[in-house]
Image (spheres, helix red, strand yellow):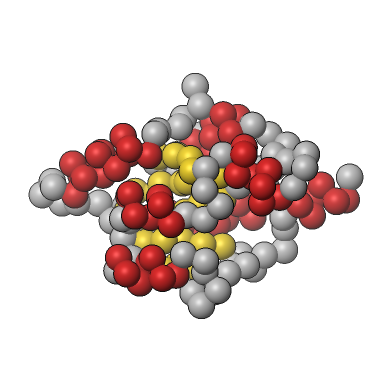
Amino acid sequence: MSGLVQRAALSAELELLRGSGAPPRVVLANGCFDLLHVGHVRYLEDAASRGDLLVVAMNTDESVSRLKGEGRPVVTLADRAEVISALACVDRVTSFDEDTLEETLRALVPDVHAKGTDYTSETLPERHVDEELGIEIAICGDPKTRSSTGYLEKS
């Protein structure tokens, strides 16, 4: 089982939860997660600490290939999603085919948009959407010292 939830189904689920007496504080984190490493885990654990429900949006294989280049991803979306969904801090996993998270932010409207430390709130590509929708930005994780691309370049 891949652990993937379709974006439309997740949007409907979140809408139901928001209508409940005590709606959860939803945090949305995203990334390629091509080769999972400790930096990813720390990012997701920090993101999860910012709310009640952590949703992880993962780039599809096609999106990773466009962003990272030929030969990427190394690991398929189904396998990446299964590994990410097995982490205790992750509540839901969805995917997106676009190069940025804008459409997913509009569909899910999380309370918090978590990004890794390779970004600042000023350099976030989706910043205008976060501001438009009133989504809090949280920069999460350890200072970026690891990357899947870096590991691949060493091999």
Residue 132, image x, y percentages: 32, 69
Above or below residue 23? Residue 74 is above
Residue found 40% across the figure and 50% down from its top: 104
Residue found 73% across the figure and 37% down from its top: 74
Above or below residue 41? Residue 113 is below
Q: From this viewpoint, which residue is outermost toward the top?
A: 1
Q: From this viewpoint, which residue is outermost toward the right?
A: 155
Above or below residue 78? Residue 108 is below
- Is 154 positioned to the left or the right of 135 in the image? right
- Is 131 positioned to the left or the right of 39 in the image? left
Report if residue 132 is visible in the image: yes
Residue found 62% across the figure and 39% down from its top: 62
Report if residue 80 is visible in the image: no
Is 155 in front, or is 134? 134
Residue 155, image x, y percentages: 89, 45
Q: From this viewpoint, which residue is outermost toward the left?
A: 21
Is 114 in front, or is 101? 101
Residue 53, image x, y percentages: 34, 48
Q: How many badges with numbers are in the image?
A: 0
Residue found 41% across the figure and 70% down from its top: 128
Residue 36, image x, y percentages: 65, 43
